[in-house]
Image: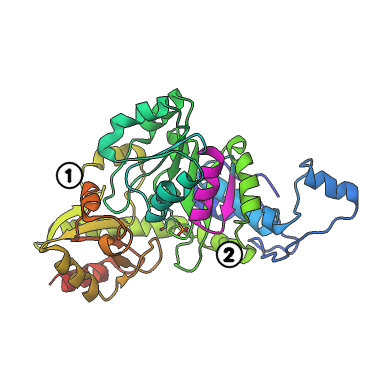
Amino acid sequence: MTDKPTGAGLATRSIHGHGFVDAHGSPHPPVYDSTTFGFDTTADLLDVVDGRKPGSLYTRYGMNPTIQALEQTLAGLEGAEAAWSFCSGMAAETALFLTHGREGIVCIGDAYGGTLELLSTQLPLLGIKTHLILGGELDRLEGLLAAGAKLVFLETPTNPTLELFDIRAIAAKAHAHGALLAIDNTFASPVNQQPLTLGADLVLHSATKYLGGHSDLTAGALMGPAQLLGPIWDWRKNLGSMIAPTTAALLARSLRTLVVRVERQNASALRIARAMDAHPKVARVFYPGLADSPGHALARQQMQGFGGMVSIEVSGGGAAATRVADNLKLFALAPSLGGAESLVTQPCTTTHHGLTPQERSRRGITDATLRLSVGLEDAEDLIADLEQALG
Ligand code: PLP
């Protein structure tokens, strides 16, 4: 391994940040699918086991050259000292919560349905106190921190209403009480937002989304200082939630095009948001790039791009929205996001199906809300598809 090019720009880091030098001159790390790695002597083995020397040992520990090269790139993308990769975003979340959330977790704002389920159902079964507060209830944060919660977790922008939270301000509140702030940066991607530079302590990704970028792999990542990631390693090791080497290589391949993909998705999403804003059959558009969006000023301060996710509220209610979703031809009706292919979901039938209508409406989600994940197709084709479906 060589030193990672920390000073380089994001695109350069995403391509050259792995630090791997291949004996045969391959420009990228090969797939080492070995589960175990051999040593010449017991002394050599103990040097690696006891951490005196870097090296590979056992794949489930993450001590595999393909995985280690991926993690060096992942750390560089978020400007972090270190990164761990996982077999899914939920595996990364579970390891994070079990390591740093045992004294209480505050989740702010809307979050991915699996996150809400883990926080409201499984973790309390283990005696972990979890508190779910919405953006309009931020005044409760201080009290929950004073009562002992030691981990604040949030997504920004949120799913599906693209609400933004001020990372700097929330980090300051958390730190004043000795708590950590972890940001799920899946929706923004490191191209549009780097939470560690804004004061967050840890960053989480469902790498299944923009980092993977092709809807063909499931993975997760956590980035941050080595001191905070160190204890997470033990949970990952013993939960067995390690990424597979072949998936690690596929993800590393995807990261090399992350910047160009997301920049195009940003540009197309802005065009689509503007077209939808002007459309007579669209009652509301949620996109932080629109100048009159509630999160626009904050997005300009803490984001470098507005992202590839756009939500719309179709005039005419839930049945009209279902018809639009069913009539789209280029946007596939499917959950997930961040891939080359554009996707549409109606949150009341997918991501937020498990919530009562009252709870959805508290979160600003109506039956007429559609969430669009803008892919890499031509923006004019996507707009034409939306127009024919709305028509
Ligand atoms: N975080 C966000 C914002 C997500 O959208 C998802 C999945 O949709 C997850 C986390 C969980 O990731 P995974 O499906 O890779 O476990």
Q: Is residue 380 left or right of residue 199?
A: left
Measured along the vertical axis of the image, is residue 315 above or below residue 148? below
> Is residue 275 at least partly visible in the picture?
no
Residue type pointed to by label 1: Asp
Q: Residue 297 magenta-drawn?
A: no
Find disc 2 in the rendering and name its residue: 247
Q: Give the colouring mode of the picture.
A: rainbow
Residue occupying the point 15% across, 54% down: 284
Pointers 1 and 2 in contact (CB under 8 A)? Answer: no
Within the displayed image, which quadrant is ligand 1 positioned in? bottom left
Q: The C terminus lies in which quarter of the figure? A: bottom left
In the foreground, 162 or 348: 348
Q: In x, y percent, where is residue 42?
A: 89, 50
Residue located 79% across and 59% down the image:
37
Asked if one can make out residue 150 in the rendered structure from this viewpoint, the answer is yes
Q: Secondary structure at mark 2?
A: helix
Q: Any magenta on residue 100? A: yes
Give the SS element for disc 1. loop
Q: Which residue is disc 1 drawn over?
A: 292
Q: Relative to 164, say whether 150 is above or below.
A: above
Identified by mark 2, the residue type is Thr
Other residues around mark 2 within 10 Å, as few (<14) / some (14–19) / many (≥20): many
Mark 2 residue CB less than 8 A from any atom of ligand 1: no
- Mark 1 packing: few (<14 Cα in 10 Å), some, or many (20+)? few
Q: Which residues are magenta?
A: 83-101
Q: Please name the predominant secondary structure of the magenta segment in the image.
A: helix
Marks 1 and 2 sit apart, C-alpha to C-alpha, by: 41 Å
Closer to the chain start, of discs 1 and 2, is 2
